[in-house]
Amino acid sequence: TSVLNDEAFSRFLLDLSGGKDSRMVLAAVMKVPGWRDRVLINSKDVSSNNDLQVSCGLANLLGLKFNDEIGGGTESISVEDNITIWRSYFLGSYHRVGAAPWSNLGRRTENVTLSGGSGELLRPFWSSAFNLPSRINDMRSILNKISRPGTISIPQEFREQALRQVRSELESMPGRTAIEKLDAHYFFFRNRTHFGMRAFSTYHEHLTVFPLLSKALVAAGWRCSEDERGNLAIPRDFLRKLHPVLASLPFEGGKYLKWEGMPGPIQWLDEDRSQWDAAQGRLAKINAASRCGKKVIFSWRDWPGTLIKHIRAAYDGTPGLSRVITEPDLDVILSGVLSNDRISQARGSVIMAAHDAVHP
């Protein structure tokens, strides 16, 4: 309510996927008087899932309008400048390397996006990602399970040293069990850079806010037991309270929330995407008009090669790295970067960050 009623913003987007988190934000927005005339829906076509189909089904059922007004960045940024901005801003705190061929350069202050980001705080994160059984209650066993050797052969002495350090930090986290302590790591560390530190996207796009970071919701999440969090108690109860129909509709992957005495789930949604396709066509025209006559200085073809140049220079400029990452290991990383492998890019980001920490 406070965001939608803030006079500093004139246009609002709502990120809507097929997941539970963005649907919780939608349910909250639908409680604000006049929301329908002010909020546009932003949905992506992700080839690996049916997010868009679910989003279109919700839009067709509820009369939502897809974004056909707020375009992307209007100024082209070079590959070199993208890497420099990335290294300077995150400085080793986040490694999922991103680039923006077009940027708003921080000028679009009238727009704001409402996102379902940080919903991970309301349910198990690392334990779910690593598919850990709840019966494991020893931190060393957990770390041995999730730190399987990969393509990079870290010397055993360094691996043991790293595991001891990580184990010590995880055991200092709040929580009654080792699993709870592991999941607490996301709240205290990962979340800050996963959905915090938004100046990067604010500069290139516009401001994004995360309603699920509400103090009351986060507190409720921490009061739940690990089993309740695993059974999605917060999303279920939140949606049932604010919008029971949204609680009963299918999510991405054909999943449903479940509760005792629930009515039969609504299994049918009109997934026609014609409204979304039309909105995308109008956005393409808006972007073309705003970029007309401007020289394009970013090329995705140059992206991997330039990243490799930066990673190689960072490695060569930090001799101590060769004790942990050998030349053959570096070759594996650079080969992965060349093929746009995200894990390899993240490892390359670590190398650049190590260099930048030693040579600020």
Image (cartoon, rainbow, N blue to C red):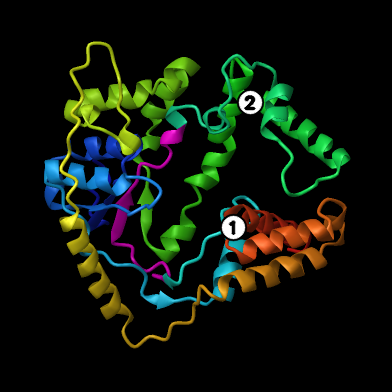
Q: Residues within 10 Å of mark 2 (few under 14, many from 20)?
A: some
Residue 103 percent location from the top left of the image: 42, 70
Evaluate whether residue 4 shows in this view: no
Asked if 297 appears above or below 15 in the picture, the reply is below
User: Which one is nearer the viewer's eye here, 261 or 7?
Assistant: 261
Secondary structure mostly taken by the magenta-highlighted segment of the chain: loop
Tell how many labels.
Answer: 2
Which secondary structure, mark 2? Answer: loop
> Horizontal placement of 227 versus 19: left or right?
right
Which residue is painted at 41% across and 48% down in the image? 48
First reached walking from the N terminus: tag 1 or tag 2: 2
Q: Residues within 10 Å of mark 1 (few under 14, many from 20)?
A: some
Which secondary structure, mark 1? Answer: loop
Q: Quadrant of residue 58?
A: top left
Q: Which quarter of the image is occupied by the N terminus?
A: top left
Disc 1 versus disc 2: nearer the observer:
1
Q: Which quarter of the image is occupied by the C terminus?
A: bottom right
Q: Which residue is mark 2?
A: 173
Which residue is painted at 70% across and 63% down in the image? 334
In the image, what residue type sits under mark 2? Met
Asked if 54 appears above or below 330 in the picture, the reply is above
Which residue is painted at 31% across and 33% down in the image? 254
Pointers 1 and 2 in contact (C-beta within 8 Å): no
Which residue is painted at 52% across and 77% down in the image? 78
Asked if 139 appears above or below 276 in the picture, the reply is above
User: Which one is nearer the viewer's eye here, 200 or 319?
Assistant: 319
> Does the magenta run of residues contain 104?
yes
> Does the magenta run of residues contain 344?
no
Which contiguous range is marked in magenta? 103-120
Q: Quadrant of residue 356?
A: bottom right
Q: Which residue is mark 1?
A: 341
In the image, what residue type sits under mark 1? Asp
